[in-house]
Image (spheres, rainbow, N blue to C red):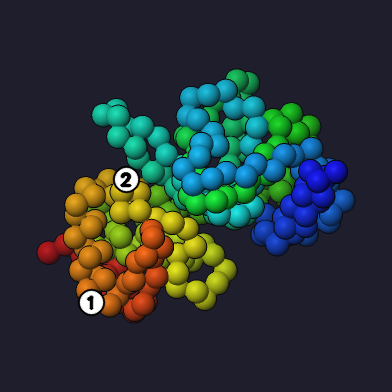
């Protein structure tokens, strides 16, 4: 009974996400009613890279970092999935799909996990929904492309872009990043050394640009972060 109540509450949450804009509760019951709510603790694994993909789903709250191992064995973060993001949907159409990245919770997070067969039998019958998921993926690719253009930019510009990108993903005027973000995670997502990230962010803290506490980052001077985004290599 409790699971049924929790799932119904989750379906109502989905109404707030752009990907389900225009859907009714009846529609969501058909598309997601067989789902399971997964409550993840900080750093807990949701999906393992290389494992058979038997489900996909939607981030309800918190966030999940998508990462994959580099040839040298380092952890490279490719994306931060936030509420409303869909994870692993399009690989469901493959004959024997495997997860291309690993997914780890960033702080307490909730995920609506849906069986693969539901995508094949129901989601694929809704072209408008598939188009919206494609738009989400396009935005993700857009962020990766911008990161590519910043390859030769100073690390401070890359960090500034990352912070702004995360803030812009949430429909809020709050300048506190709504996910716990360590210096190592910033370094892993930018291909930088932890020491270099610490040096820059410590300088920003001393200058009153940001404030950090228990892996939470608050931007105090948004204009300075925007200025950092425009700094180019000399």
- Residue that mark 1 sits on: 207
> Residue 166 location, x and y as percent?
45, 61
Name the residue located 78 percent from the left edge and 32 percent from the top edge: 121
Place residue 97 in its image quadrant: top right
Name the residue located 57 percent from the left edge and 23 percent from the top edge: 52
Place residue 115 in its image quadrant: top right
> Residue 154 location, x and y as percent?
20, 60
Q: From the viewer's perspective, is residue 5 above or below residue 199?
A: above
Q: Residues within 10 Å of mark 2 (few under 14, many from 20)?
A: some
**Residue most toward the left?**
234
Name the one closer to the observer, 188 or 226: 188
- Residue that mark 2 sits on: 188
For the residues bearing labels 1 and 2, Cβ distance under 8 angstroms: no
**How far apart are the two marked residues, 1 and 2, measured between alpha carbons?**
25 Å
Q: Helix or strand or loop: what does disc 1 sit on?
A: loop
Evaluate whether residue 75 shows in this view: yes
Q: From the viewer's perspective, is residue 172 above or below residue 87?
A: below
Name the residue located 69 percent from the left edge and 30 percent from the top edge: 116
- Left or right: 234 as drawn, with respect to 126: left
Q: Residues within 10 Å of mark 1 (few under 14, many from 20)?
A: few
> Residue 141 location, x and y as percent?
46, 48
> Residue 61 location, x and y as percent?
60, 55
- Left or right: 97 as drawn, with respect to 68: right
Q: Quadrant of the N terminus?
A: top right
């Amino acid at each position: 009974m409790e699971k049924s109540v929790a799932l119904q509450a989750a379906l109502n949450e989905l109404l707030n996400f752009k990907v389900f804009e225009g859907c009714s509760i009846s529609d969501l019951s058909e598309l997601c009613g067989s789902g399971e709510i997964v409550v993840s603790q900080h750093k807990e694994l949701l999906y393992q890279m290389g494992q058979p993909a038997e489900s996909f789903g939607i981030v309800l709250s918190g966030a999940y970092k998508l990462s994959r191992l580099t040839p040298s064995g380092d952890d490279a973060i490719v994306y931060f999935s936030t509420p409303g993001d869909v994870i692993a949907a399009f690989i469901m159409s493959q004959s024997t799909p495997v997860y291309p990245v690993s997914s780890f919770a960033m702080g307490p997070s909730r995920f609506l996990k849906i069986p693969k067969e539901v995508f094949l039998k129901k989601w694929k019958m809704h072209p408008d929904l598939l188009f919206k998921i494609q738009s989400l993926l396009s935005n993700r690719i857009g962020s990766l492309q911008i990161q590519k253009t910043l390859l030769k930019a100073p690390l401070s510009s890359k960090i500034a872009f990352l912070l702004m990108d995360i803030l812009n993903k949430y429909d809020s005027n709050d300048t506190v990043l709504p996910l716990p973000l360590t210096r190592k995670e910033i370094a892993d997502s930018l291909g930088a050394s932890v020491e270099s990230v610490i040096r820059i962010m410590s300088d920003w803290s001393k200058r009153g640009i940001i404030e950090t506490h228990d892996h939470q980052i608050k931007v105090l001077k948004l204009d300075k972060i925007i200025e950092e985004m425009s700094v180019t290599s000399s």
